[in-house]
Amino acid sequence: MKNDLLLKALRGEVTSRPPVWMMRQAGRYLPEYMVLREKYGFFERCQTPELACEITLQPVDIIGVDAAILFSDILVVPQAMGLEVQLVESKGPFLPEPIKTGNDLERIRVPDVHETLQYVFDAITLIKKELNRRVPLIGFAGAPWTILCYMVQGKGSKTFDEAKAFCYTQPVLAHRLLQMITDTTIAYLKAQVKAGADTVQVFDSWGGLLGPEDFENISLKYIRQIVHALKEEVPVIIFAKGAWYALKEMAATGASGLGIDWCIKPGLARSMAGNNITLQGNFDPAKLLSPIPELKKEVNKMLNAFGNGRYIANLGHGILPNVPVDHARAFVDTVKEWEGT
Amino acid sequence: MKNDLLLKALRGEVTSRPPVWMMRQAGRYLPEYMVLREKYGFFERCQTPELACEITLQPVDIIGVDAAILFSDILVVPQAMGLEVQLVESKGPFLPEPIKTGNDLERIRVPDVHETLQYVFDAITLIKKELNRRVPLIGFAGAPWTILCYMVQGKGSKTFDEAKAFCYTQPVLAHRLLQMITDTTIAYLKAQVKAGADTVQVFDSWGGLLGPEDFENISLKYIRQIVHALKEEVPVIIFAKGAWYALKEMAATGASGLGIDWCIKPGLARSMAGNNITLQGNFDPAKLLSPIPELKKEVNKMLNAFGNGRYIANLGHGILPNVPVDHARAFVDTVKEWEGT
């Protein structure tokens, strides 16, 4: 690997500087992505390895990030399990027949991932070839709780109260569903690794909607299974947005990396997570809209606070579609130019 | 006052049990409210003292809460400042001409609250008469940052990135606007108190979208002014959803009460906030959808964790519209029946 900063940082090895990538870096802020978005539907882009490959490589070529992350969506998993998933552009996901009862569970299954998601593994094989060992490739999946949110609520929500009510009123069903998602996700991520993913990230976008006790019972319990199943093969990164209260417990899973959002100071995150894990984050995505000199100042402040060592520079959530490309590049360049503390 | 549990708890006096009320308790889960909602538009309900009074009293009469909270909306403040605010039912607020530039600031002013918001003070006078000293009345306003969010973004948002970008790119303007909102809010809350509000709560619904440093500079700085201006007259409660990281700083403002959401354990909240402030919360609103026996168990767990003393039982955010009335009542009754630790 020509640039293996990310993998070194995840393994806790000394690096010349922190690696940098951005969540949702292959996305709508890139004009080159928008061209493909206008020509092809969402699932067409995911399911056509050549398109997924082209999109995955865009931020590596255009912005110069230290890692590629597979272009795909966490909702390919419920789709593979047998639920219809529609992704209407700018409207978010819609699942016309969500899970509400025990009967609904009969409609889904733990699929053979090679039968249902082979297009992802083909994309990974192609991406690895095109990357030609320039930077590592990150695979990913949603955390089971976040996937359940969509499978039950059927669409995006501020509170995902129907998904929570499902867990509170039908806990046996909910845990059966969570286990099915977990089993699918483990097989899915293992196949991503086999196809060439150098590390995998588990996205728990809605983890922070749960209180500390529910997060343990409904989310972390299943994330832990995923980490245990994968960690001997590749480094695993957990990112549970808003779940700052469980940093210690997440660090104890054996994950190599822990994503954090911008609502926790680096020092506190480090003291909660301990020294045996790599922290990743935590620039406020909205700050990429600041004037560039201000942006650079803020990035340097973040770098100084984390220091170089078990640290990956990233945003605290996905990059916003309205970020100018030169601001995204300024973020990455500032990390590359950082001279240390 | 026949039932002054809330005021005693806010003053740190010994109470027989914790007082209980629910954020958004005069709301859509009540069939009696829905009847009025179908007959009258949102601002008609706010601006007609008889209607605002009837709605404010509904949860006192129907659910038996220990405090009434004025039926109104935080967006009456930008409205009084000169911005058009539309509240389309189930669609959320819409401000057709949001603030984007310095010129836009010329369109608004710090109003005479008696000229623009007298209907609120009239409602309070009427409510106090109808309450007839049964329970205290809580007045309220939005925190300046949360109000700015709507004034700049023009509508609800998951990220309020345009409001944040406004602060990052035009800080001088942003602080001028925040100060105008603060001045209006202080006059507004003082007049609420003069009309009879026994305590006031400042709602910073979007405080938690800011990182710790921004929260101090953009939000808490102005909340602090409000607390200082009001605290000699009535106890002030601050509720900044998601801003757990600033509990210590918020407690240091001189506020009497501190609302917390369900993403922080009671013990940690207490240790961050210290012992000289009353904590209020923090039941996950979605848990009111649990079966009643489970709900009661969870409420008792919360009560045992907070203990009786400088504590007000409440939800960690507003009650959801789909909560059955008997579940809301079970929440309140469980607090009333609690036998202590």
Image (tube, coloured by chain):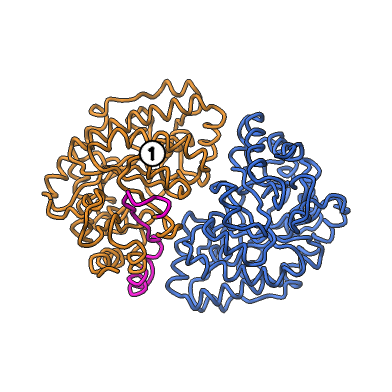
Chain colours: A orange, B blue
Q: Quadrant of the C terminus of chain A?
A: bottom left
Q: Point out residue A144 in the picture as x, y percentages from the top left corner.
A: 40, 35
Give the magenta-colored segment's residue range: A271-298
Q: Point out residue B100 in the picture as x, y percentages from the top left corner.
A: 49, 71
Q: Quick check: B310 above or below B152?
A: above
Location of mark 1 (residue): A143
Is residue B166 toward the left or the right of residue B124 in the image? left
Task: Tell me the residue at 40%/34% (across/down).
Answer: A222
Q: Point out residue A45 in the picture as x, y percentages from the top left corner.
A: 25, 44
Task: Tell me the residue at 24%/38% (across/down).
Answer: A47
For the image, the number of numbered tags is: 1
Task: Tell me the residue at 63%/43% (across/down).
Answer: B305
**Label 1 CA crowd tier, 10 Å (few <14, some 14–19, many 20+):** many
Q: Is residue A14 visible?
A: yes
Between B37 and A66, which is closer to the camera in this rendering?
A: A66
Between A182 and A275, which is closer to the camera in this rendering?
A: A275
Is residue B9 toward the left or the right of residue B153 in the image? right
